[in-house]
Each structure stands twice: as structure tokens, then as C-alpha cells.
Image (cartoon, rainbow, N blue to C red):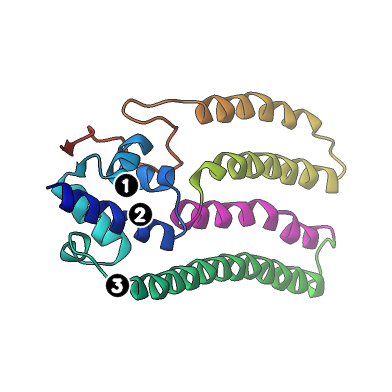
Amino acid sequence: MDNLKSIVAKNITQLRIAKGMTQLELAEKLNYSDKAVSKWERGDSLPDITVLAQISEMFGVTLDYLIHTHKEADDSGMKLSAATKKKNHVFITGMSILLVWLVATLCFVILSVLPIDNRIQWLSFLYAVPVTTIVWLVFNSVWFNRHRNFLIISLLMWSSLAAIQLSFLLFGVPFWLIYLLGIPGQIIIFMWSRLRYKNTSARRGFFDKPDNKEKELY
């Protein structure tokens, strides 16, 4: 049993590092505490079989892979694959954000040639900012550090308020009081970011599911 614990501990650690994840990030994806992950990686305990299945699916390996030893050569190939995936995620996120601005530019050009108020054309760039934060929020929730979501949500809120206020200002209507909505909104976001949950030593990220009870085999 001790040998099995050490094998599983080594494999989980290698897979996590190859994926570029911290113990806390892995714990969040599994809805466990980082202390539980630390125990698994030290070989102090074994994850439940259902958790092992989750881990194998998350890292794209078989359950059999987790309980057997492997050559060190396999690790370098795994790291390369994980690094490539991470780089691809960054590029995909960047291209998606650039696509938002491409659409905004296209709208600007179309509105510029139409016989309408030329102040309207600038709205395309104005509203591209909050749309950019929405795209960033979605990809960050799927691939990156979810704790950053609270910052992105704040940017989304303030950029949306600014877009609305500047829209009114373009037509000569001062609407500065709209920023007052951001004060309670920011307080709510801050308090939300400080929430603590049972069976975890750190807050969950945006879009996370509720925690399951911590189950371990000793």
C-alpha cells in the first residue's frame, strides 16, 4: 500500500507540474482543499477512486497510468506538451480579443461611410472595451488562474459604466452620477472575493462548483 501511495504521489506531482498548475489550482478543479492535494503528493494518503478517475481525465492519461511507475523520459515529453498547450491557450485568448477589436474597427468603418451622426461611429470602440473583458473572463475561467476573475469582473463593471457615461457625453448629456453604481458594485465584488468555503483553505474561483466532502483512503 505504501508503495502504491508513493507511485500515485509521484505521478500526480509530475502531471500537475507538467501542466503548469499549483496544488491550489488542482485542488480547486477537484473541489478539494490544497491540504488534501499536498497529502496525496507526499504519499500520506490516497485519493478516492472517483478522484483518481477525475485526475486521469483532467491530465489526459489512463487510470492505469496513475498507479504504475514510468520512465523519466516520459516527463520531458509531457512537459513539452503541457507548455505547448498553455502557449496555445494564450494565443487563442489573444486572437479572440483581437477579433473583438477587428469587429469594432469594421463597425467604425461602416458607420463612417453612412450618412449618420459621425459621433455614433466611436461607440464601436467604446463598447469594445467591456466586450474585451467579457472574452478575457470566459477564457480565464476555462484555462487560467480563476482568482484573477475578480479583477476582470471589476474591469468589466467600470468599463461598462464608462461606456454608458461617455455615450451620453457624446450627445452632450452629462451623466456622471452613473459611477455611483460602481461603489456598491465594487464592494460586492470585494466581499465575494473574500468568501470562505467549508473543506477548502482558499476561496473558489468564478464558475467553480460547490465543494464535495473530502474523501481519502488512508
Queried whether the magenta region covers residue 153, the answer comes back as no
Q: Which residue is located at x 77 percent, y 28 percent?
A: 177
Q: Position of residue 196 (x, y in %)?
A: 43, 25
The residue tagged 2 is 13
Direction right: furthest residue = 172
Distance between the alpha carbons at the discs numbered 2 and 1: 6 Å
- Can you tell which quarter of the image residue 30 is in? top left
Q: Position of residue 110 (x, y in %)?
A: 74, 73
Q: Which residues are magenta?
A: 119-144
In front of the other: label 3 or label 2?
A: 3
Q: Which secondary structure class fits the magenta region best? A: helix
The tag earlier along the polypeptide, 3 or 1, is 1
The tag earlier along the polypeptide, 2 or 1, is 2
Q: Amino acid at mark 1?
A: Glu
Q: Secondary structure at mark 3?
A: loop
Q: Which residue is located at x 50 percent, y 58 percent?
A: 139
Q: Amino acid at mark 3?
A: Lys
Q: With 117 as the anchor, is 82 left or right in this view?
A: left
Queried whether the magenta region covers residue 141, the answer comes back as yes
Circle number at residue 71: 3
- Can you tell which quarter of the image residue 111 is in? bottom right
Query: From the viewer's perspective, is residue 163 above or below residue 117?
Result: above
The residue tagged 1 is 41
Rate crowding at label 3 as few (under 14), some (14 to 19) or many (20 or more) other CA atoms within 10 Å: few
The tag earlier along the polypeptide, 3 or 2, is 2
Q: Position of residue 7 (x, y in %)?
A: 23, 56
Q: Amino acid at mark 2?
A: Thr
Q: Secondary structure at mark 2?
A: helix
